[in-house]
Image (cartoon, rainbow, N blue to C red):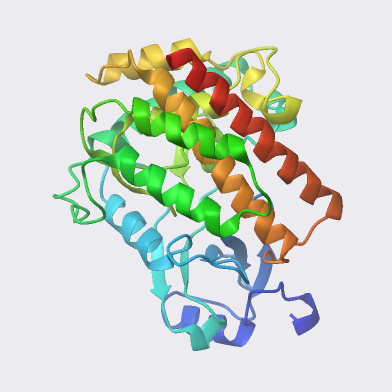
């Protein structure tokens, strides 16, 4: 593969030498940027025999200190491998930046479907769609049931005061990343501080749990949960609230009016997902509206960071300049949804 065809963010010689020491590799390797991610860069690695792996590394520029920790993500996947939480098997972690310009890790490639839009959802049968929703909740309860001390993740983060810590963290990241003044973010931040409910339990919190961060098998059920980069310990209802934020009911517009795949016939409704979670967990879901409000607010903070990186040229795939305005507008729209959700709590 010529250097001209190598995606930005990959040193082919360095990565080839590193991977050859850890897996059965038939050189040369090909590297393809997997589109769809707006945070860490993800590449498909294919050897001459057709064997596939996945490589993850931070964005090329403007990396915040704690936002793109490859070692942390690798550690979480390694710890969850022996549990009943479906995750891709890991090959190894490289912290020597001389190899590829930044830390990275490699995992096995897992075959599966990523449901990111209605076109993909419509390729599924009604049974597969129902199974996807049911499995999504079932796996989430498995994640929340993991004994963190037993798998070696007991010190992954502080276990208590999750919401207070998250409000501080994401507000700080927002302040570092923001491209303009957004008073609605400040107002909702203050309201969430005042309305935080007591934390019922401490568990693993994925932090970005949604349908398109999972791979679905042929039966529609989850084959692997991906994108663990902001996982920590804390309040499991934060994952449930964020799932409600991303999930659209039938005939309901998604973010910025874009049709959501979960609105296609056959997927469970939000209410059905909540009922299923309540059936499989003994947590009290009566205060879930707070976590929905928090989920919208956190998402607005995250997307402002994505917007800032695009404007600064941080991502390997710079895309169409028109995308920049879309992300900027999306931040405002989602922050307004957060404010509306907060108002329902008062």
Q: x%, y% of residue 114?
A: 60, 40
Front residue (pair 69, 136): 69
In the displayed structure, would residue 291 be above or below residue 1? above
Q: Is residue 132 visible?
A: no
What residue do we see at 46% from left, 48% from top?
A: 170
In the displayed structure, would residue 268 be above or below residue 73? above
Q: x%, y% of residue 283?
A: 25, 20
Q: x%, y% of residue 328?
A: 72, 45
**Does 103 sit left or right of 263 as displayed?**
left
Q: How many marks?
A: 0
**Does 181 sit left or right of 79 as displayed?**
right
What residue do we see at 32% from left, 61% from top?
A: 75
Q: x%, y% of residue 228?
A: 43, 51
| Quadrant for the C terminus in the image | top left
Residue extending farthest to the left is 150
Front residue (pair 318, 147): 318
What residue do we see at 50% from left, 17% from top?
A: 343
| Quadrant for the N terminus in the image | bottom right
**Does 105 sit left or right of 114 as displayed?**
left
**Does 153 sit left or right of 73 as displayed?**
left
In the displayed structure, would residue 335 be above or below residue 177? above
Front residue (pair 163, 322): 163
Q: Is residue 305 visible?
A: yes
In the displayed structure, would residue 206 be above or below residue 81? above
What residue do we see at 44% from left, 54% from top?
A: 229
């Amino acid at each position: 593969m010529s250097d001209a065809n190598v995606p930005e963010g990959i040193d082919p010689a360095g990565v080839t030498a590193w991977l050859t020491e850890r897996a059965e590799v038939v050189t040369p390797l090909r590297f393809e940027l997997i589109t769809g991610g707006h945070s860490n860069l993800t590449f498909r690695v294919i050897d001459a025999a057709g064997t596939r792996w996945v490589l993850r590394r931070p964005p090329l520029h403007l990396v915040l200190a704690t936002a793109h920790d490859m070692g942390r993500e690798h550690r979480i996947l390694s710890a969850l491998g022996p549990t009943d939480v479906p995750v891709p098997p890991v090959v190894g972690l490289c912290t020597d930046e001389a190899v590829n310009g930044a830390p990275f890790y490699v995992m096995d490639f897992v075959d599966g479907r990523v449901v990111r839009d209605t076109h993909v959802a419509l390729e599924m049968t009604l049974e597969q769609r129902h199974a996807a929703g049911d499995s999504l909740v079932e796996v989430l309860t498995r994640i929340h049931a993991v004994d963190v001390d037993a798998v070696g993740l007991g010190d992954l983060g502080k276990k208590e005061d999750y919401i207070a810590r998250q409000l501080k963290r994401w507000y700080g990241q927002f302040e570092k990343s923001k491209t303009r003044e957004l008073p609605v973010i400040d107002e909702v931040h203050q309201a969430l501080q005042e309305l935080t409910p007591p934390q019922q339990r401490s568990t693993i919190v994925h932090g970005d749990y949604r349908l398109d961060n999972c791979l679905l098998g042929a039966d529609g059920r989850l084959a692997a949960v991906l994108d663990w980069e902001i996982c920590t310990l804390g309040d499991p209802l934060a994952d449930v609230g964020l799932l409600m934020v991303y999930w659209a009911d039938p005939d309901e517009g998604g973010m910025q009016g874009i049709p959501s795949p979960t609105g296609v016939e056959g997927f469970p409704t939000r209410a059905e997902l909540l009922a299923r979670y309540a059936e499989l967990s003994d947590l009290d879901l009566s205060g879930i509206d707070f976590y929905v409000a928090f989920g919208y607010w956190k998402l607005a903070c995250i997307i402002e960071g994505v917007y800032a990186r695009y404007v600064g040229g941080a991502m390997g795939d710079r895309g169409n300049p028109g995308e920049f305005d879309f992300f900027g507008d999306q931040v405002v729209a989602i922050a307004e949804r957060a404010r509306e959700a907060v108002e329902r709590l008062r």
